[in-house]
Image (tube, rainbow, N blue to C red):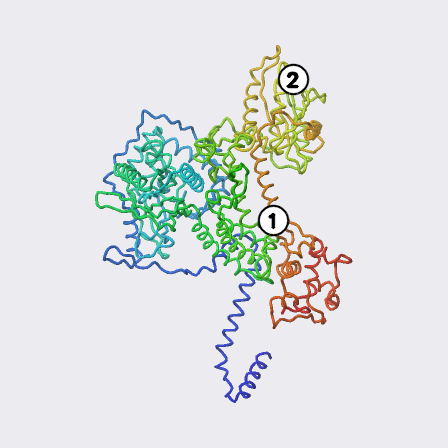
Amino acid sequence: MQEDIFHSAIHKEAAALGEPPPTQLDLTPEALDQTVHQAKRHYWCTQLDNFSDSKDIFKAIKWNRTEGTFPTPPLKDGNRVHTTANAKAELLVKTLLQKAVCTEDVPVNCSNPEATLPFPDIITGEVHQAIFQAKSSTPGQDEISNAVIKKAWPALGLHISALYKHCAATGWHPTPFCQALLVALPKPGKKDYSSPCSYRLIALLSTPSATDLAAALVHDIEEAWACGLLASMLTLDIKGAFDAVLRGRLIQQLCSQGWPPTVLHWVASFTQDRTAAIQLDGHQSPIFAVPAGLPQGSPVSPILFMLYIEPIFKLGPALVRRGRFGYADDICQLVVSKSLEENTAKLQSIVMDLMAWGHREGLTFDLAKTELQHYDKTRKGNNPTCTIHTLEDTVEIMPPPPNGATCWLGIWFDRKLSFKAHACTLAGKAKQAAGGIQALANTVRGVKAPLLRQATVACVVSVLCYGAESWWPGRHRSRQSISGEQKLVSNGVAAQLACLDRILRCALLGSLPVYRTTQTAALHRESAIPPMELLLNQRQQALAVRVHQLDTRHPLYRRATYPRNPHIRTRLLRAIHPANFQNIEHVDPLIMSPWDSSQTPEDQPTAAPRAQAREDFQSWLSSIPQPSLVVYTDGSKEKESTAAGAGWVGYWGTNRIKILSGHTKLPNQEIFDAEARAALLGLQTALKNHRPWHATNLYICLDNLEAVQQLQGQPRGSSQSVFRGFQEKARAWTNYPRAPGVQPGTVQVKWVPGHTGIEGNDEADKEAKMGCQAPLEQPPPPASIAAAKRAAWRVHWQHFTQYWADEAPTRYKNLGIGLEKRPPELFLPRAALGSLLAARSGHGDFAEYHERFKHDDALLTCSCGRRKEPSHFYFCRDGRKAAAHPWGQQPVTDILTKKDGFTAYADWLGRSQFYTAICKRH
């Protein structure tokens, strides 16, 4: 029927124009196009509405990329052109994998009588940890992903562990694992994809942070500036990297480092008889031999490569080595002096030494990728080059112009360290993801807001904040004036911030169902994503805490704790505050070896109902030896307090007679830290007054499972020194003198179900709460890592709250809307959420809004005849007739601000179809 009406209308219009009516054949293409368009629209709308997982969002964000999928162009080898898939694969193998000069290798010798490095036996726990901590990546030729191995671990765990142990003990690597499937991927940004060097081979096997180095580099440059010196940087790239490693020389290097023969044999087996096939344009090439190199897909390859090039970082005097940084095959050399010309002369000498070492070891440096960058705050225009002489030619390394920049580790360094080029580059990368987010939804339909918010954080915010630990100086810094007064000075980053904020705003406009004119502050509030300045400051604060968790030999830790001049304040030192460095505990990540089987937790409680757990504990308690001491410990913390309380009580065996108790207040500690401190203090109290004289075992019972495991295992996090102190005291328990007939026992840690009516646990909880109210000890212990992280988050949230108080739109202030860490309104249907946010901000289909922006063709009134207003839904008679108001006598303010109010509002919109049938848009 509709088709007949359509044709009759077309005939009438044609007759009115004096033209012959179109035939049925003429109308067919147009009808086909409309049908296909509607079908596509319906399909994609259904797809977007059904998205329920973040993986779907991450895939959909890439839809707007327009590169397309095209076959690899013909590859050139001199004047010869390769067009077939096998010929291309053969050329890629020849150019990228078989370029190592194997004639420069040395014979493999795995005997090392002077081995000095120990290699303990592998334990099952290590194998389990290695498998379950690895991410599930693309499977190899056997099509078995790591996720499958995790699922099969209960059945295959013992067999997999046996394979690991046998391979390590015999120095053998299974031959099937030596075959790889290589995927040829084009390197982004290359101009000529007919060159084999424009591709990267990624292996699919059956099998420290870059920004930290950049932060150390920036610190050294600013330190040189503060001393009146100039700096120059030269970046070097090892040609071929993993593919250029020679097997015999690798074994020789490992032997000189003191590795035992079993390791040498395994590495020799790992690098022997390697084969691979190339996947190119959907075609798999024949299998070919790989005579040298390390497989790029294996997690052990980067470790072996770093051990292979380790001598690079020991060449030259100490001052030169301090300015040498390396990350995989990317090497950077920094030199400082009073002139740039002197710097280039130093760099020339250093590069010649490195090239001489590389020639001896069969490695070459790709001088075509070598870059030179000078750092000078003055306005001098000199920009000297660096000349490098090789056996074949003389290469002149040209620095970029004074306003140019050089990229190293993904960060763009310019001459004055303004990082404007870096900010613009990040904005360009994030803009693609922001565009993909905007394409997935609008104000009435599309992907759910929480999923798009998650995509914004993962795909946009993470890109915009990349490298912030190294380049972000803060908007202002403190400087002392001539009169001695401290004042704030701008760091000149307003342009960089504006560039990043624009992209973040685009992403927020896509993730939220709002009009494009919506106030920026409202976008930040509704998405719970702060502006870029606060996000960058948060990264800086996180760095200040993370430095306390680094090895003492880490470049950042050394620069933070041993500054050359205490009066110099680089952006790294301003973030870390060296004067307050001792106020936070230090956690050593290498204090314990992961293969130390003596530190394996014994008590591994499983999930059980509370009543059953209580019954099991009582049964265990009644079975312990009578001459034993049981100490219950607990930690507590009051809301909005920075101090925690630790409490402990002790009993003889199963008796209910309390023999010891105590509590203490712990400033700048979290509950987890209080649990650890309570266990230590409870143990120390039990060791006093000759109590071990009559006791066999000492049982420490607490209700924090993580603390139980750390007390028995390997503490690597917050309160590490407390856990270590507990373990030392526990080992000393056996050595205490005993009464005649009392056998020395051990200290055992037991998990007790909390708040289940167990007397000792309840008493310890009371003591911990009393500790929260107790006076502070003098001097207080350093703040724990957990408390420092909580304090950094608290400062970040306070700054966000202050930003909202200063920048909140007037309508939001009138409604009394504050910040929410997880806004519940985001989980409303997208159309309802769009109507709610429009009513809050005033930016929507309202008469005042259209008049303000001069939308002359807009519909300003509802079907009831009244002007469209944000609160019109509340008073509209037609809307009330369509569906009764579910909010009763609640005022409009409560409906727009409270969870039960806007939940009822969304339900009413769905039943009444208010904005689609009554108060129609535009």
Q: Nearer the viewer, residue 174 or 330?
A: 330
Q: Is residue 636 above or below residue 861?
A: above
Marks 2 and 1, how far apart in space? Answer: 62 Å
Q: Nearer the viewer, residue 147 or 733?
A: 733
Q: Position of residue 203 (x, y in %)?
A: 37, 47
Q: Which amino acid type corresponds to the residue marked 2 in the rendered image? A: Pro
Q: Which mark is residue 627?
A: 2
SS at circle 1: helix
Residue neighbourhood size for the residue with mark 2, other residues' Cα within 10 Å, grouped as few (<14), some (14–19), many (≥20): some
SS at circle 2: loop
Q: Nearer the viewer, residue 158 or 296?
A: 296
Q: Which residue is mark 1?
A: 803
Q: Which mark is residue 733?
A: none
Task: Assign the C terminus to one quadrant of the image.
Answer: bottom right
Q: Position of residue 675 (x, y in %)?
A: 62, 30
Q: Residue furthest right?
A: 889
Q: Is residue 566 visible?
A: yes
Residue lying at 63% horizontally and 63% vertically, measured from the top left? 844
Q: Residue furthest top?
A: 740
Residue 105, picture quadrant: top left
Q: Is residue 207 above or below residue 531?
A: above
Q: Position of residue 566 (x, y in %)?
A: 47, 32
Q: Is residue 618 above or below residue 531?
A: above
